[in-house]
Amino acid sequence: MLRSSSRERGPLWRDPTFRALLVQGILLLALGAFVVMVVSNTMANLEARGITTGFGFLQDRAGFSIPQTLIEYSGDSTYARTFVVGLLNTLLVSAMGIVAATLIGFAVGIARLSPNWLLARLASAYVEIFRNIPLLVQILFWYFAVLQALPSPRNSHSLFEVIFLNVRGVVLPDPQPLAGFAATPWALLVAVIATWGMVRFARRRQARTGRPLPVFKLGALLLIGLPLATFLVTGMPLEWSIPSLQGFNFQGGVTVLPELIALWLALSIYTASFIAEIVRSGIQSVPEGQVEAAKALSLPAGIILRKVVIPQAMRVIVPQLTSQHLNLIKNSSLATAIGYPDLVAVFSGTALNQTGQAIEIVAMTMAVYLLINLVVSALMNLYNARTLLKER
Amino acid sequence: MVDTSTVTEMVAERRPPDLRRGLLGWLHTNLFNTPFNGVVTLITLALLAMVLWPTLQWAVFQADWLGDSREACSGKGACWVFISARFESIVYGFYPNSARWRVDLVFLLMAVLVAWLVIPRLPAKRWVGLFALVGFPVVAFFLLVGGSFGLEHVPTRDWGGVMLTLTIATVGIVGSLPIGVVLALGRRSQMPLVRGFCVVFIEFWRGVPLITVLFMASVMLPLFVPTQVEFDKLLRALVGIMFFWSAYMAEVVRGGLQAIPSGQEEAAKAMGMGYWQRMGLIVLPQALKLVIPGIVNTFIALFKDTSLVLIIGLFDLLAIIRAGLTDSDWLGFATEGYVFAALVFWVFCFSMSRYSQYIERRLHTGHRN
Amino acid sequence: MNEATAAQTDSPMIEITGLNKWYGDFHVLRDIDLTVARGERIVICGPSGSGKSTLIRCINHLEEHQEGRIVVNGMPMTRDVKRIEQIRRNVGMVFQHFNLFPHLSVLENCCISQTWVQKKPRAEAERTAREILERVQIADQALKYPGQLSGGQQQRVAIARALCMQPEVMLFDEPTSALDPEMIKEVLDVMVELARDGMTMLCVTHEMGFAKTVADRVIFMDQGQIIEQAPPETFFNHPKSERTQLFLSQILGH
C-alpha cells in the first residue's frame, strides 16, 4: 500500500477531496453535454427554418412605427433604434412608477401607524386589497374598464379648459420656451449648488458656534426662489401651447397615451402596497426604547425623527425598497399586455415577430434587465456595507 | 429627609376618569384625541362615503343578478349575468362536457388535501404533505390528461379557466420547491463549481422579468430540442415558470438554512451521519418548517403571476374572461369581468396571506406541534 | 425664568401629590404622594408589576398620568410640549436595556443632546463628553459603537450620556437587571460615585447592598402604591408592614 502522506487514507472513492472533485467533474460534463446538445439542435433548427444568426439584423430597416418615442424615430429607422426607443420607454414608465409608488407607499405605511384608528384601518385595507390582486388584472382593469370607458375627444372631460381627458389619453398644455428662457434652468443649477454650499456652511457653523441654521427653510427658499425670480426678471419667457379641439381631435398640447397612464397607475398602486408594508415594518423595527431614550434627553420631536428614528428605520427600509424598485422595473414589462411600447413589447414582440431572431432578441432583452439588476445590486451592497451596524 | 419610617394604609382600586371609558372614551382616544386627528377622521369618513356608497350601489343594490342573456342587463348597475352566463367556461375552459367530472374530482381531492394540511388538529401532516407533493400530481395528471385507464384524452389546448390557473399554480409550487431546495443546498456547498453554478442560476432567474422567461419558453425552447420532438405549449410555459420560481424558492430556503444554528449540523456529524442524512433528517426539516411563511408568500406571488400566461396565448382564468369581453354579444362589460377576476384572485391570495401570518405568529410564540 | 431660578433654591427637587394613573381600566398608580429633597438619594423597590418603573417614568413624562400633580425643580408638569422638554432637561434617565443609539458612536451618543438641546459648539460638547466619559472610566472607548461594548460598558455610557445634559436629578430604571453578574459592580461603582458627588437620585433597583450604602430613604411599593418608606437601617432591620417583611424575606432570604 502506498503511504504518501502522514495520514492514512481509506479507499479513493471515500476520500472527501476526491468526492468533491468527482461531483464537480460530473456537473461540468453534464453542463457541457447540455450546451453542446442545445447548440447543435438550435443550429439544425435554424437552418431548417432558414434563419441566419447574428446581430446583423440590428442594422436593418424596422419598418413599423411606435406611438410614443422619446427620441426621433420613424419606420425607416433600424432595429437598433427600435431597441433604444423601447428601452427609453421602459425607463420612462419605471421612473414615473418608482417616484409615485415610493410616495404613495411611504404615505400609506406611515398612515398604518397613525393613532387615528380609522386612518390606520383604511391604510391597511389599501395594502390588503392591492397586493392580493395580480398586477396584470390591475393593468387590464385600469386600461379597459376605466380609460377605455372615457368619452371620445369631442366629449372630453376637461379641467379648467386646459387639461383634457378622453379615450385617447390626457392632453396637457405644452410649455414652449422662448428666447431668454435658458436663464431659468441655469438659475436652478446655481440654486442647487448654493443649497449644497449652504448646508455645508450650516454644518460647520453649528460645529463652531453651536447655533443651527434653519436649513430646510433656507434650502426651499433658494431652490424655489432663485429660479422663480430669474424667470420673472427675464420677463416670463415661456409660452403654453393650450390644446384645443379641432374636428375630431386635439391640436396643440402634449398627449399622454392611455397605455402609459394605465401602466403607470397600476404599477404605482400595486408596488406602493408592498412599499407601505416595508415602511411600516421598518419604522416598527426601531425599538420603543430608542424614542424613549431620546425623549429623556429632552430632544424635540423633529430631531428625534431626523437623528434617531429615520436613520435606523432606513437601514431596514432601503434594501427592501430597492428590491421593490427592481420589481417595478421588471413588472413594467407587462406593458405588452395593453400595447404600451416598452422594450419587451416593441423588441421582444414586434421586432421578434418580424425578424424571427428569437435567440438574439430575447437574450438582448434579458441582458438589459440583468444589467440593471446587477448595477443596482452592486450599489445596494455598497450601501449595506456603509451602514452596517458595528458590532462585536 | 425622612427620619422615621411611615406606613400607609391600602388604597382601594378605582375606575379611571370617565373620559377613558365606554364608547365615547373609545371614540375620543382613537378618533378625536387631538383637533388634527378629528379633522383627519372627518376627511377619511367623507372619502369613504364618496367611494364606498357608489361602489356598493353599483356592485350590489343596482346590479342585475338573474338571467342568462344580455337582455337581463338593465344598465343601472353591474350586470353579473355576464359572469353567470359564462361560469362554466370560466371554471373549466374548453374541457369537454362529458369529462368535467374528472376536473371536479381533482378539485375535490385538492380541497381535501389543503384542508387537511391547514387544519392544525388533523394528524399525519407529514405523510399527507408528502402525498400532496408527490402522489396528488400523478393522480391529477392521469385524471386531467386522460388517454389511459379507459379515460378519453383531453389535449392541453382545451384546458382553461380556473382549472388551468390552479394547474399552473400547483405544478409551479410542486416543481419549484424541490429544485429550490437543491439550489439552496448547492449555494451553501463547499465545492466552488457547484456553488458558482447555483449562484449564477439563481441570480439569472431573479434578474429577469417572468414575461421574458415565458417568451423564451415559447419561442426559444422549441429551437433547443430536436425538430421532430413536439413540445406542448403548456408544458413549455410550465418549465419556464418552474425554473423562474425555483430561484425565488431557493432564496427563501437559504434563509431558513442560515437560521439553523451550526451546532445542529455538528451534532449530526458527531453522530456519524453523512451529508444527505444530516440535511434530510436534521437540517432541512427544521429549516423548511421555519420558512413556511416565506414559502406561502412565494406561492402567493406565483399564484398571482400565473395570469401572465395570457400573454403567450394560454387561456387561464383572466384570459378566458378577457376573451369573453370580445364576444360581440357582450361588449362593454370590462368592469364586471375584471372586477370578478380580481375578486377570485383576491379571495385566494388573501386567505393564503392570512394563513401565512397565522403560521408566523405561531412560530413566533413558540407553540409548535 | 425668574420664577424658576427662585424656585431652585428653596423648593424640593420633585414634588408629587395625589398621583393616579390607569392603563386602560387597570389602576397602576394609586394616590402617590412623594417629595424628594435636593441631594436626596432614594431607592424604590417592590415586586414586579408594583408600578415602581411607571412612577419614575411619570416624572419625565415618558408616561402620562391622569390625576395628580407633579412638580420638578419648581416647574409644574403640564401637557405643554415645551414645558415637558424643559422639565426633561433637568432629569437624566438610565434604562434597564441601556437604549443607546446603535448608529452613533459613544461620543456622538453623549453629544446629541448638547448639540441639539443646549446648542453647544462641537468642540465644547466633545470636551464635556470626554470629561464625563472619563468620570465613568470609559473614555478610551469614545470612538467605538455601542454594539462593540459589553453590557456593563454600555450602561456606563448610558449614564454618561444622561450626565452630559447636566441634569439636576437622575432616574435609574433597574439599571443592573439586564447585566451579567460580573458587570453589575462596575455600574454600581459609578452610581455610588455619583451619589457621593451629591446628585439627587431616584433608583428603581433590587440591589439591596447599594440601598444600604447609598440611600437616604428606601421606598417599598406594591399594587401601585407606596406601602412603606424609611431610612435603610430602619427599613431593613425593622420593617413594619407585613408585605415589606414578606418581600424582604423573599429577596434576602437565601
Image: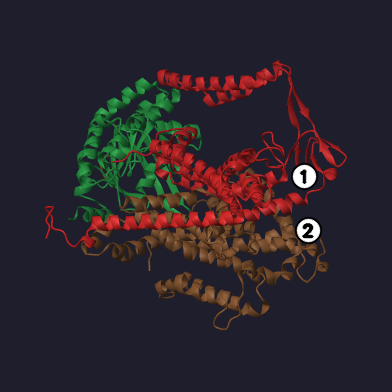
Chain colours: A red, B brown, C green
Q: Residue furthest right?
A: A247
On screen, residue B251 versus residue A261, left or right, reads: left
SS under mark 2: loop
Residue A104: tell me if it is visible: yes
In the picture shown, does residue A53 fall above or below B89? above
Label 1 is placed on what type of residue?
Answer: Arg
Residue A264 or residue B328, whichever sits in front: B328
Q: Chain of mark 2?
A: B
Residue B28: tell me if it is visible: no
Same chain for labels 2 and 1? Say yes or no: no
Which label belongs to residue A359?
A: none
Which label belongs to residue B332?
A: 2
Residue C185 or residue B369, whichever sits in front: B369
x and y percentages locating residue A21 in the rendered image: 29, 55
Label 2 is placed on what type of residue?
Answer: Gly
Which label belongs to residue A168?
A: 1
* Residue ID at (70%, 52%): B51
x and y percentages locating residue A304 in the rendered image: 46, 35
Q: Residue B13: name its quadrant.
A: bottom left
Q: Residue B67: name its quadrant.
A: bottom right
Q: Quadrant of the N terminus of chain A?
A: bottom left
SS under mark 1: loop
Q: Quadrant of the C terminus of chain A?
A: top left
Labels in figure, total: 2
Task: State the separation of the CA atoms marked 2 and 1.
Answer: 17 Å
On screen, residue A44 versus residue B333, left or right, reads: left
